[in-house]
Image: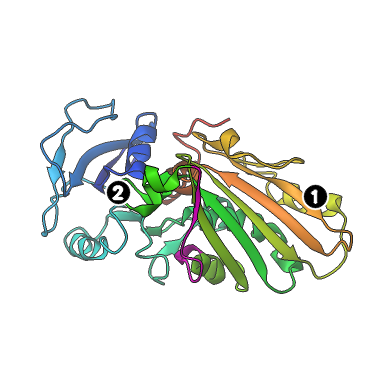
């Protein structure tokens, strides 16, 4: 059985790629062997401490050389990974893939996997879930059998969620003293939730003038009258074996989860009818919303404990 796994990253200069590299510094079983980039090459991979001599290789329009590599992390922008996956799969059929982008989230060949919500081991083709979609599903999965009708989720994210390339959603001038709504219908993460968790969902994303973190507030109609303690018990029992997820009595705060691998679910309240529930979920979009789950899923695919290499609170 393999104990040490060599990784290659296709992409990796974006925010999430850099977080994955940072986690790999402390992972006892994963070694970063190669990093490919379209925008730069022959320059050091900053932040990787296990090998100070590791440099970026140029990503061409041909299959990258991956001899000896066990795992490929696809860290490209959306709509860019499929052609490389096809070439790599053809030339290296035993490689484990994980795609951080949205390109394979609705592909039945790929395993869409939120670690704490999945009962099965990861496959060799893993589609990492979206950050908003993860937070919404952490809010709904424990209680979805008692939901009646449409769920409405409001989300706000730090501008790192808009990526490192300049655009309207990370423009400092547009964000100053502002919150920007966008993709108000049919957001990819809404479609993920509808596909994998709860179909009758509405989601409205927003970006705020802070760098990292997500807060989701969901409004939920229940099938019957409940007490707050009933709902708290359901959540706490569901997540009792999940060290990264805490169910709080109070409202979760973005600044309590930023730069951490954790999820905070809380703000659980009912209106006077006992049928209309509000739940909040906070997590770091770059970590638990992306890089942390990348490592958890790869650990699963490699037969390791899912928390291997993660230092958590």
In which quadrant will I find the N terminus? top left
* Horizontal side of residue 78 vs 274, given as left or right: left
What whole-number distance in Å separates the C-alpha atoms at marks 1 and 2? 44 Å
Q: Residue at x 57, y 39 (%)?
A: 262
**Boundaries of the magenta span:** 177-189
- From the viewer's side, name the closer residue of 72 and 222: 222
Q: Which is more N-terminal, label 2 or label 1?
A: 2
Residue shown at 26% from the left, 42% from the top? 13
Q: Report which residue position mark 1 lands on.
A: 233
Q: Does residue 116 appear anywhere in the picture?
A: yes
Residue 184 shown in magenta: yes
Q: Please tell me whether mark 2 sits on a helix, a strand or a loop.
A: loop
Q: Residue under label 2, please give it.
A: 166
| Location of residue 261 in the rendering, given as x and y in whole percent from the top left corner | 52, 38
Q: Main secondary structure of the magenta part?
A: loop
Coloration of the structure image: rainbow
Disc number placed over residue 305 in the picture, else none = none
Badge 1: few (under 14), some or many (20 or more) residues near its Cα, within 10 Å?
Answer: few
Above/below status of 180 relative to 90: above
Q: What x and y, as percent, mark residue 87?
A: 18, 63
In the foreground, 127 or 178? 178
Image side of residue 296 versus residue 95, left or right: right
Tell me, yes or no, whether the highlighted magenta stretch contains residue 312. Answer: no
Rendered residue at 50%/69% (across/down): 191
């Amino acid at each position: 059985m393999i104990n040490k796994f060599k990784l290659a990253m296709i992409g990796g200069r974006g925010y999430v790629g850099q977080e994955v590299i940072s986690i790999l510094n402390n992972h006892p079983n994963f070694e970063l062997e190669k990093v490919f980039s379209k925008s730069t090459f022959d320059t050091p991979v900053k932040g990787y401490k296990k090998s100070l001599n590791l440099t970026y290789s140029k990503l061409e329009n041909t299959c990258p050389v991956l001899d000896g590599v066990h795992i490929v992390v696809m860290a490209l922008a959306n709509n860019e990974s499929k052609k490389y996956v096809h070439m790599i799969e053809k030339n290296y059929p035993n490689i484990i893939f994980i795609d951080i982008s949205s390109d394979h989230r609705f592909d039945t060949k790929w395993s869409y996997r939120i670690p704490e919500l999945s009962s099965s081991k990861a496959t060799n083709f893993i589609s990492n879930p979206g950050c908003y979609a993860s937070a919404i599903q952490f809010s709904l999965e424990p209680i979805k059998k008692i939901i009646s009708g449409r769920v409405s989720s409001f989300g706000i994210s730090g501008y790192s969620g808009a990526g490192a390339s300049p655009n309207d959603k990370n423009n400092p001038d547009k964000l100053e003293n502002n919150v920007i709504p966008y993709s108000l219908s049919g957001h990819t993460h809404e479609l993920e939730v509808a596909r994998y968790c709860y179909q009758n969902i509405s989601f409205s994303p927003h970006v705020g003038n802070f760098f990292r973190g997500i807060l989701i507030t969901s409004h939920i109609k229940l099938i019957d009258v409940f007490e707050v303690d009933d709902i708290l018990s359901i959540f706490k029992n569901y997540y009792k074996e999940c060290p990264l997820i805490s169910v709080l009595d109070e409202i979760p705060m973005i600044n309590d989860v930023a730069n951490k691998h954790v999820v905070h679910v809380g703000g659980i309240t009912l209106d006077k009818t006992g049928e209309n529930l509000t739940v909040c979920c906070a997590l770091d979009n770059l970590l638990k919303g992306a890089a942390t789950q990348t490592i958890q899923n790869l650990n699963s695919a490699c037969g390791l404990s899912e928390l291997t290499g993660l230092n958590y609170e």
